[in-house]
Image: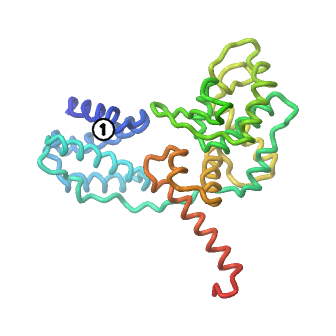
Amino acid sequence: MEQIMSDFITYLTKERKASKSTVSSYCRDLDRMFQFLGKKGIERSTDITEINLNSYILYLEKEGFSVSTVCRNVASMKAYFHYLFGKRLIEQDPTSSIKAPHMEKKAPGILSQQQVGHLLEQPSAQSIKGIRDKAMLELLYATGMRVSELLSVQMVDINFNLDYIVCRDEEHLRVIPLGRKAKEAIQRYLGEAREALLKGKKSNYMFVNCQGNPMSRQGFWKNLKEYAEKAGMKEDITPHTFRHCFAAHLVENGADLRDVQEMLGHSDISTTQIYMDMAVGKVRKSYQKAHPRAY
């Protein structure tokens, strides 16, 4: 069993190009499944049946695991047994007829373009900290990168001549265009604030705190909450809000869904599709409100 799991992890990493967090989740999910089945005297993958797995899914639901967690566990077991079947280590795939519980896709909270603009004006243009925070917020909205990717940006990742930035997602890299507003904010930060924050230290990371160390996730979240309160926003604003707004506003203004998918780094376009559905819903509401023959 241990050797099979080791081979499966290698397959996920090398062939599926799965991230470390995805591999970790798969391992955790499968370990829980093996423990459950082991208590029932099932020790070998070849002995596991569809009935056993449905029993395990029922157990997860009775234990109070969320629908999203159960769905992820089903995805983990499907990937594992699909791998075994493909390698002919089992005669049939016991997950072939198993379906994950239905999970409603919740539409993300989206700010209007005016609201985003108002939030971006909150950092002080007169302080070193404010100049840095303005650059970070502009970059988030300009690229749709995750907060972990924002904090990982290094000095070599940005090209002002060709107006693009390299985004690092663990083992993966992607190139995203850089808009004028973000470019200007970053150039001002680099010219007027970064050296003062570094206080003589050296760092490859673009964004540093007041001690000259790389910005932390907690520090950035704290700053963002303060700016949201200053802007008088009642919405729950997180760094991911900017990612949602980036995608939704692009789609609203006619961007191709495949291009948005690539910029967001989504492996599955169905994840990006939710922004198109939201845009269509917005257009429909406008039509129903304004067209004399809508009803």
| Left or right position of 19 against 15 | right
Q: How many marks?
A: 1
Q: Is residue 206 above or below residue 232?
A: above
Which residue is found at the position 29% from the left and 31% from the top? 10
- Image quadrant holding the C terminus, namely bottom right
- Image quadrant holding the N terminus, namely top left
Quarter where residue 165 is shown? top right
Q: Is residue 170 above or below residue 121?
A: above
Colouring of the image: rainbow
Where residue 80 sits in the image (x, y, percent)?
A: 26, 43
| Left or right position of 12 against 259 | left
Residue lying furthest top: 200
| Left or right position of 85 against 294 | left
Quarter where residue 98 is shown? bottom left
Where residue 53 sits in the image (x, y, percent)?
A: 24, 52
Where residue 274 sits in the image (x, y, percent)?
A: 52, 59
Which residue is found at the position 79% from the left and 30% from the top? 188
Disc 1 element: helix
Please give the residue where the numbered disc 1 appears in the rendered image.
31
Where residue 163 sits in the image (x, y, percent)?
A: 66, 36
Q: Nearer the viewer, residue 38 or 8?
A: 8
Which residue is found at the position 35% from the left and 48% from the top? 73
Residue lying furthest front: 161
